[in-house]
Amino acid sequence: MPYRCSRCDKQAIANIKYARLRLCREHLTTYIEKKVESILRKYKVLETTRRIVLAVSGGKDSMAMTWVLWRLSQRYPIKLLVTNIDLGIDGYSRRSSEIVRKYSQELGIDYIIVKLEDLLAYNIKSLSRLARRSTCSMCGVVKRYLLNLIALESKADYVALGHNLDDILAYSLKSFLSGDYISLVKFTPITKSIDGIAVGRLRPFYKVYEKEALLLALTNKVPFIVDECPLRPESSIEFHIKSFLNSIEEEKPGIKIQWINNLEKSLRDIQRNLDVGENLRVYKCSYCGLLSKSNICSFCNTTKRVLGRPLGAELRETIKRIIMVKNSPSI
Ligand code: AMP
Ligand code: FES
Ligand code: ZN
Ligand code: ZN
């Protein structure tokens, strides 16, 4: 039997067990939008930010995030720049970039699509083969580096990532189980910029369940690429952790949101007690000058080893030119 929405007379399309709510399309959208708005307001992002680079892969999370931030950009003075990195993965990257391009045009958001092969003359598969690294870890290095460069050069205050609540719990539990406690500190909704070398990160979907992001995209006709990246391992650790967390949520609705709230609070307390720069060392890459875990960043290190020279600084010049051309008035 169809149920009524808890907030109006319309038919409910979603049963949000942990909040004891059944919601119609409209109220589901408002419910999720409010979650995003409230986390961004809590960290004073909407009032103090000028420009946000949106990292958009074409998948459901980052596409739904684009839609929500676009709606918020009509009420707050924030400028958005959608960014997609075409990694050259068979047909998958081309289709993803096309969805991102079309949707940005439809919403009237500025966008930039960069192709790895145009920048380095290699796609992600051949680069990782040469570097003897797994494609996913190489892909992480390249994406982080490029997103930071694009954000620095376009003078953005933040890079927004599409990670949802389930992703963050899975990554943080994986870090915890593998003893990588240092990485845990970064799983906050927001990280600060470090002047001139790293742009801060935002996770607007920090409190949004994966299922909610999917429903938001489907009910608001947000296009997205359904297939996963073909180079991802079939059953990753994150996949197993997510299934495990979902089975607990099934028995104890709300446990995931409770855990993410606790994680956020504990990390805020830890961050307050840590003065980055004194207790945690911030390194600058000696080749490109950007944030690094040691005195050479992973990107310069890999390109030096594999392609014969560190390419960070050159890549920065290329990105600077791309952004300059993009911003110059057309003739
Ligand atoms: P992943 O690490 O692949 O799960 O992706 C996490 C987030 O990184 C996504 O939600 C996007 O915000 C961003 N992202 C992933 N792939 C790309 C891409 N090819 N271009 C731009 N952003 C990306
Ligand atoms: Fe990075 Fe597939 S998206 S390896
Ligand atoms: Zn309703
Ligand atoms: Zn470097």
Image: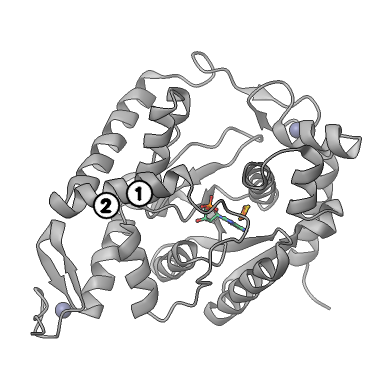
Q: Is residue 253 visible?
A: no
Q: Which residue is mark 1?
A: 242
Q: Which residue is mark 2?
A: 246
Ligand 3 occupies quarter: bottom left
Q: Pick whichever, 293 or 233, lies toward us.
A: 233
Circle 1 — which element?
helix
Return the x and y of residue 114 as percentages of the image width and height: 73, 61
Q: 242 left or right of 199?
A: left
Q: Report if the CB atoms under discs 2 and 1 are less than 8 Å apart.
A: yes
Residue most extreme to the top: 278
Q: Pick whichever, 134 or 305, lies toward us.
A: 134
In this rendering, is residue 169 above or below 229?
above
- Which residue is drawn at the image coordinates 9% and 80% (left, top)? 3
Amino acid type assigned to the residue bearing label 2 in the image: Asn
In this rendering, is residue 205 above or below 176?
below
- Which residue is drawn at the image coordinates 88% and 40% (left, top)? 307
- Which residue is drawn at the image coordinates 42% and 24% (left, top)? 181
Colouring convention used in this rendered image of the protein: one colour
Return the x and y of residue 143 as percentages of the image width and height: 65, 49
Which quadrant holds residue 173? top left
- Specify the quadrant that holds the C terminus: bottom right
- Which residue is drawn at the image coordinates 49% and 14% (left, top)? 279
Disc 1: residue Cβ within 8 A of ligand 1's nearest atom:
no
Q: How busy is the neighbourhood of tag 2: few (under 14 within 10 Å), some, or many (20 plus)?
A: some
Return the x and y of residue 222 as percentages of the image width and height: 45, 77
Amino acid type assigned to the residue bearing label 1 in the image: Lys
Q: How busy is the neighbourhood of tag 1: few (under 14 within 10 Å), some, or many (20 plus)?
A: some
Q: Is residue 79 visible?
A: yes
Q: Pick whichever, 210 or 7, lies toward us.
A: 210
Which quadrant holds residue 306? top right
In this rendering, is residue 101 above or below 171?
below
